[in-house]
Image: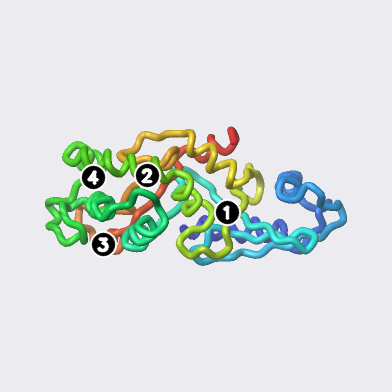
């Protein structure tokens, strides 16, 4: 997470924590009412930042019940990222119609250098557009596999994550001044019926390498071998949800 995102979570927490409902801004009163419609105006709200790789970023406690919220802001939102081998292990055990060739295809795509482990020469590294043109069969195989496992994969990406701890129930897009909130289950329904302009899409999410480091920069070398899912239209889409 960026430093800006980290600060945003803490500012939101500070706006909520140890405050009576009737003292909150209208934005956060609306948020609390959305997650807990039966809140009393005299109730004290508590909030804490969870941190780590959990899908929920903030825990909000109302009337002794905990609610878990994922926080996003800005544009081009990455909603999930994990090491490639961890992701392949997940799909090999939890997704239907998995074959070893699917695992090999996703590794081949993410590394983008013609190998399954990133050991190819720098000159062989392709961007997503180049890869799609050169390997259309692998792309089509992955699109079909992702489509057949849409719901379970979206649940991992938005609710459970790779850590499986503190699953997210709600998604808040905004900052400590204004924002929009929705249920994660509604977001999954929306995304599963959507599409995006990506070499491999998972409904409304794009599937990509975090960074193939095509120019062989020392600063980006550690970013190779990571799979990333982005929700480019999140800012507009959440208002529709």
Q: Are marks 1 and 4 in contact (CB under 8 Å)?
A: no
Q: Label 1 vs label 2: CA separation?
A: 23 Å
Who comes first in sequence, dot 1 or dot 4? 1
Residue position marked by numbered label 1 in the rendering: 70
Q: Is residue 66 left or right of residue 199?
A: right
Q: Is residue 94 above or below residue 147?
A: below
- Residue at the image point whose x is 77% and y is 52% from the top: 24
**N-term mark: 1 or 2:** 1
Q: Is residue 216 above or below residue 234?
A: below
Q: What residue appears at the point 47 percent right and 49 percent down from the top-left corner?
A: 152
The residue singled out by tag 3 in the image is 221
Query: What residue is pinned by disc 2?
Result: 146
Residue at the (65%, 61%) spot, across then down: 59
Q: Quadrant of residue 64?
A: bottom right
Q: Residues within 10 Å of mark 2 (few under 14, many from 20)?
A: many
Q: Nearer the viewer, mark 3 or mark 1?
A: 1
In this view, 230 is above or below 54? above
Q: Nearer the viewer, residue 137 or 73?
A: 137
Q: Secondary structure at mark 1?
A: strand
x%, y% of residue 208?
A: 33, 48
Asked which secondary structure carries label 2, the reply is: helix
Answer with left or right where residue 193 lies relative to residue 57: left
Quadrant of the rendered image containing residue 145? top left
- Quadrant for the C terminus, please: top right
Give the image location of residue 85, x and y in percent: 32, 62
| Of the pair 90 and 57, the residue shown nearer to us | 90
Number of numbered callouts drawn:
4
Between the C-alphas of marks 1 and 4, the distance is: 30 Å
Judging by the rendered image, the residue that carries numbered circle 4 is 127
Residue 141 at x, y percent in the picture: 27, 42
Specify which label sits upstream in the sequence, 3 or 1.
1
């Amino acid at each position: 997470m960026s430093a800006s995102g980290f600060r945003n979570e803490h500012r939101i927490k500070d706006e909520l924590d140890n405050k009576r409902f009737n003292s909150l801004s209208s934005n956060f009163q609306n948020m609390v009412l959305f997650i807990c419609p039966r809140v009393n105006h005299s109730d004290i709200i508590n909030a804490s930042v969870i941190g780590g790789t959990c899908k929920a970023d903030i825990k909000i406690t109302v009337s002794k019940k905990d609610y878990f919220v994922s926080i996003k802001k800005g544009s081009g939102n990455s909603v999930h990222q994990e090491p490639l081998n961890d992701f392949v292990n997940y799909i090999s055990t939890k997704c239907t119609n998995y074959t070893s060739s699917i695992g090999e295809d996703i590794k081949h795509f993410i590394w983008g250098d013609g190998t399954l482990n990133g050991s190819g020469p720098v000159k062989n590294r392709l961007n997503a557009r180049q890869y799609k043109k050169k390997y259309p069969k692998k792309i089509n195989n992955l699109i079909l596999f992702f489509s057949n496992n849409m719901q379970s994969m979206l649940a991992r990406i938005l609710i459970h994550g790779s850590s499986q701890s503190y699953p997210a129930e709600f998604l808040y897009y905004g900052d400590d001044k204004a924002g929009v909130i929705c249920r994660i289950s509604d977001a999954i329904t929306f995304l599963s019926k959507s599409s995006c302009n990506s070499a491999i899409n998972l409904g409304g999410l794009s599937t990509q390498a975090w960074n193939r480091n095509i120019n062989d920069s020392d600063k980006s070398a550690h970013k190779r071998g990571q799979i990333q899912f982005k929700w480019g239209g999140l800012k507009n889409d959440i208002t529709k949800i």
